[in-house]
Image (spheres, rainbow, N blue to C red):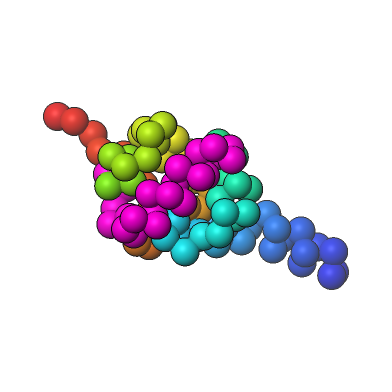
Amino acid sequence: MRTALCLFTLCFSGPMAALEINQASEAELDNLRGLGPAFTRRVIAARAQQAFVDWPDLMRRVRGMGQATAKKLSEQGLTVQGQAWVTKLTP
């Protein structure tokens, strides 16, 4: 019974806990798939100047952060000001 409960919890628990980019440590950011040490350093350096206000702000200020990367990181739980990435469809 205990094993079944553990498996249920692993399979059906909600999305992973959010990781706020404005508070995340360098180690936490490095653990995200798609962020290497150089990219993480660019994020940390830009954040040291001023906190990111939204995803477009992050993408403007950090070289290499495009829509595809934003989507992948958001799917792993990364947020900006508590918000997940939302793909904007163009008409």
Q: Pinpoint residue 26: horizontal percent, then vertical percent.
A: 57, 54
Magenta stretch, main secondary structure, is helix
Q: Residue furthest bottom?
A: 2
**39 shown above or below 57:** above
Q: Return the residue nearer the eye: 39 or 59.
A: 39
Q: Pinpoint residue 83: horizontal percent, then vertical percent.
A: 35, 57
The residue at 85%/64% (across/down) is 3
Residue 9 in view in this figure? yes
The residue at 37%/40% (across/down) is 62
**79 shown above or below 42:** below
Q: Is residue 63 left or right of residue 30?
A: left
Q: Is residue 3 left or right of residue 31?
A: right
Q: Return the residue nearer the eye: 55 or 7.
A: 55
User: Which residues, given as a range, are shown in magenta?
Assistant: 35-56
- Res 51 → quadrant: bottom left
Q: Pinpoint residue 67: horizontal percent, then vertical percent.
A: 36, 34
Residue 80 in view in this figure? no
Q: Residue furthest left?
A: 91
The residue at 77%/64% (across/down) is 6
Please tell me whether residue 54 belongs to the stretch shown in magenta: yes
Please tell me whether residue 42 belongs to the stretch shown in magenta: yes
Q: Is residue 10 left or right of residue 2?
A: left
The residue at 76%/58% (across/down) is 7
Q: Give the quadrant of the N terminus.
A: bottom right
Q: Give the quadrant of the C terminus.
A: top left
